[in-house]
Amino acid sequence: MTTATVAALATPEASVPSLHHVSRAPLFPRLQHAVEAVAAAVLAVDVLVVFTSVVFRYFLHDPLEWSEEVARALMVTLVFIGAAAALGRSRHVGMDYIRGILPAASQPYFIRGCDWIIAVVACGLSWTSLLLLTESTHQTTPTGLPQAIFVTPVLVGSVLLAVFGFANALSRLDRPALVSGVIVAVGLAALLAINTWMPALAFAPINVMLVAFVVCLAGGVPIAFALCFGALLFFLLEPRLPIVIYAQQIASGVDHFVLLAVPFFVLAGLIMEVNGMSSRLIELLLRWFGRLRGGNRPHDGCLRNRRQSRSARPPPRPDRFPERRSGDSQSLAQPV
């Protein structure tokens, strides 16, 4: 192991490059650890619920009616609590290639603008999820459970997202933070004012949504928040749709039982990595196939097989009557 590799492995987490824009140490360490502990506990309970449901359904032939709804509610909780935990460490996936082409002096303004947009999305989600929770207070699921088990995690997660979003935006009250915040606020206010008091100059909500998504994506806003920001503008500019649908659609996007395979698959991979099973599997594959040489190009094997098939073909059969064929051709050439 070289000195550069050792230095790279010993680098603290705060200096590791992030997929968003910059990697940051959590501004609220205790809150960050508490959120991550809650997410881990929710994942453990979800695994236990699904495992118990499988045992009762396929071994005891007595399925639990509430297990699927509880597992889905835990999935929603895991998504939003995990999103808040990832935002606290600035680990959301975004595209910063286009922003990297711009001058270095403008980069802090774009980064702070991304933080303000994330905070706006979190505030909008908190507001609409609170409205949705108020409307679904007395509603129940098909099995009799309260509908609030699907909405409360959205509200709690969005509030945590707002806390971490504003913390990132206001981590340093410098000029980029203030200028980018003013630009985002003035842009939103102008857009809402034009569509409210000047209908002749109003923009189509669908066009605003697409433009906002493309601009946010190019500016480095994480992909999930870029989608949510465009959708939020659409619902704000479309008076025929109630704003509560915004939170309802975001929650329903992750409220699927089959999506539980994603965290379970990641958990299985982490367990295999911790207990050394993955390294032993790689060693087993090396022992089985390590002696076999492979080509440098994917199509080398195809070309090799094609040459072998050509060499294995039988030689062409010689003509049994060459004189007859030559005589026929001569007779055809003579005039009648």
Image (tube, rainbow, N blue to C red):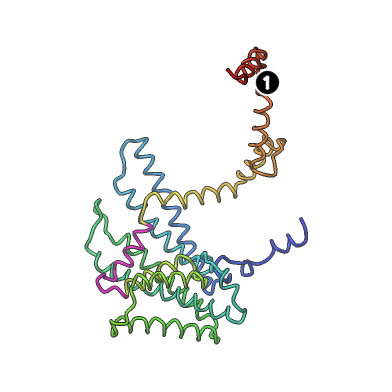
Q: Main secondary structure of the magenta part?
A: helix
Residue placed most toward the observer, 131 or 21:
21
Residue 241 in magenta stretch? yes
| Residue drawn at the location 42% of the way across and 51% of the way down | 260
83 shown above or below 265? below
Q: Using the rendered view, name the quadrant where residue 175 is placed.
A: bottom right
Q: Using the rendered view, name the quadrant where residue 310 is placed.
A: top right
Side of 118 relative to 66 (left or right):
right
| Residue drawn at the location 34% of the way across and 77% of the way down | 203
Q: Quadrant of the C terminus?
A: top right
Q: Using the rendered view, name the quadrant where residue 138 is placed.
A: bottom left
Residue 265 in magenta stretch? no
Residue placed most toward the observer, 50 or 332:
332
Could you tell me which secondary element the residue under label 1 belongs to?
loop
| Residue drawn at the location 45% of the way across and 57% of the way down | 41
Image: magenta residue range: 237-254
Q: Quadrant of the N terminus?
A: bottom right
Side of 324 relative to 140 (left or right):
right
Look at mark 1 in the image and give the residue it sits on: 315
x, y percentage for residue 116? 46, 78
x, y percentage for residue 315? 68, 21
Residue placed most toward the observer, 111 or 101:
101
Side of 291 relative to 28 (left or right):
right
Side of 240 relative to 101 (left or right):
left
x, y percentage for residue 111? 54, 76
* Circle 1: residue type: Pro
- Pick out the residue farthest to the front: 336
x, y percentage for residue 194? 33, 83
Residue placed most toward the observer, 245 or 46:
245
